[in-house]
Image (cartoon, rainbow, N blue to C red):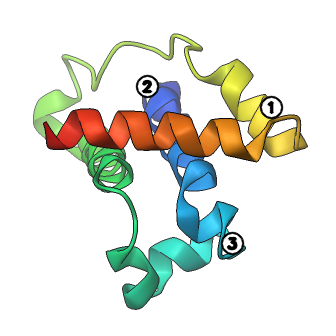
């Protein structure tokens, strides 16, 4: 069951790496999450993905989900994006455009 939240975790990591807090202001992702002032500036998409990840993690200890399972196992959907962002193999302008597109879709 430990792998069931893997996709949500990588989605949060990718979103944080693309956020202005990391890309422009050059803070570490952990600082963007921990600091209340920086957290206010995070895109809504990142906040929604963090909530989904935390819900998944809390579902791992929820006794009502112990028999049914928390979620399907990881699909590996975000593995390549995650590896590119972690290794620095990306174009920052392109990543900012992706985040703006995703965040604008959420607001519509």
Asked if residue 56 can be seen in this view, the reply is: no
Residue bearing the label numbered 3: 28
- Point out which mark residue 46 bears: none
Q: Along the horizontal axis of the image, is 13 left or right of 28?
A: left
Of discs 2 and 3, which sits in the foreground? 3
Q: Quadrant of the C terminus?
A: top left
Q: Which structural element holds mark 2?
A: helix
> Mark 2 or 3 closer to N-term?
2
The picture places residue 89, in percent across and down from the top left corner, at 88, 35
Q: Are marks 1 and 2 in contact (CB under 8 Å)?
A: no
**Residue drawn at the location 48% of the way across and 42% of the way down:** 99
The picture places residue 69, in percent across and down from the top left corner, at 27, 20
Write down the quadrant of residue 76 in the picture: top right
Residue bearing the label numbered 2: 4
Q: Quadrant of the N terminus?
A: top left
**Residue drawn at the location 19% of the way across and 16% of the way down:** 68
Q: CA distance from mark 1 to mark 3?
A: 17 Å
Q: CA distance from mark 1 to mark 2?
A: 22 Å
> Mark 1 or 2 closer to N-term?
2
Residue bearing the label numbered 1: 84
In the displayed structure, 71 sits above or below 29; it is: above
**Residue drawn at the location 64% of the way across and 65% of the way down:** 22
> Mark 1 or 3 closer to N-term?
3
């Amino acid at each position: 069951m430990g792998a069931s939240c893997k996709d949500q975790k990588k989605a949060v990591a990718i979103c944080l790496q693309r956020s202005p807090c990391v890309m422009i202001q050059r803070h570490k992702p952990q600082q963007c999450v921990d600091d209340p002032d920086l957290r206010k500036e995070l895109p809504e998409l990142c906040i929604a993905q963090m909530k989904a990840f935390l819900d998944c993690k809390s579902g791992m200890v929820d006794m009502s989900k112990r028999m049914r399972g928390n979620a399907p196992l990881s699909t590996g959907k975000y593995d390549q994006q995650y590896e590119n962002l972690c290794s620095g193999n990306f174009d920052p302008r392109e990543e900012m455009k992706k985040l703006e597109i995703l965040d604008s879709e959420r607001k519509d």
